[in-house]
Amino acid sequence: MSNFLFDLVSNLALLTIVLIACHLCNRFVPGAAVNGAHIFVALVSAALLLDAALTFLVFADAQSRYGKFSTSSAFFERASAYVLAAIAALAWQYAARRTCPAKANNENALIIRTSPYSESQLPM
């Protein structure tokens, strides 16, 4: 159980790092729209595939040396930590999207001249 908690905490720490890096990229690179949650889910999926390959191909051949890592129960603990971290990333993205207001698309806005001091915009 402690291995599961360690895996989960390390995956959540990696999620935090990816979200911060993507936020900084979006902030400092003009026109960038990098989604940190989707990148993290892609990284977790690749890690899960590599973990499965290591567990069932590499560690299975050396049972005497890697016995505790080559069991299917150890793999399913790690896999569940990966899946829970991916669900947390997608839930975080969903909650963040729900709380922030939608950005207005000013490309299709109709500008009405009301006075020389102000302009009214009517979205179409």
Image: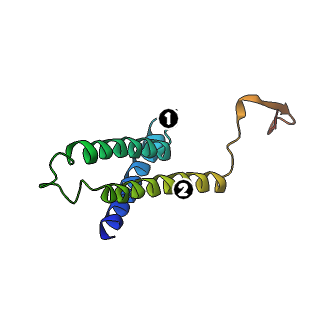
Residue nearer the viewer, 21 or 81: 81
- Quarter placement of the N terminus: bottom left
Q: Amino acid at mark 2?
A: Trp
Residue nearer the viewer, 107 or 5: 5
Under circle 1, the secondary element is: loop
Toward which corner of the image does residue 41 lie, by quadrant? top left
Q: Is residue 84 positioned above or below 59 on the image? A: below
Residue ID at (24%, 42%): 57
Residue ID at (38%, 61%): 8
Toward which corner of the image does residue 81 lie, by quadrant? bottom left
Q: Amino acid at mark 1?
A: Ala
- Quarter placement of the C terminus: top right
- Distance between the Cα atoms at labels 2 and 1? 20 Å
Tags 2 and 1 touching, CB below 8 Å: no
Q: Which label belongs to residue 32? A: 1
Residue ID at (67%, 43%): 103
Instruction: Tell me if mark 2 has few (under 14), some (14-19) or many (20+) residues whose alpha carbon lies within 10 angstroms of its own.
Output: few
Q: Which label belongs to residue 92? A: 2
Badge nearest the viewer, 2 or 1: 2
Residue nearer the viewer, 68 or 14: 68
Give coordinates of residue 50: x percent, y percent.
31, 42
Give coordinates of residue 93: x percent, y percent.
56, 51
Q: Is residue 96 positioned above or below 53 on the image? A: below
Residue ID at (48%, 41%): 26
Q: Which label belongs to residue 79? A: none
Residue 51 placement, left or right of 32 = left
Under circle 2, the secondary element is: helix
Residue nearer the viewer, 39 or 27: 39
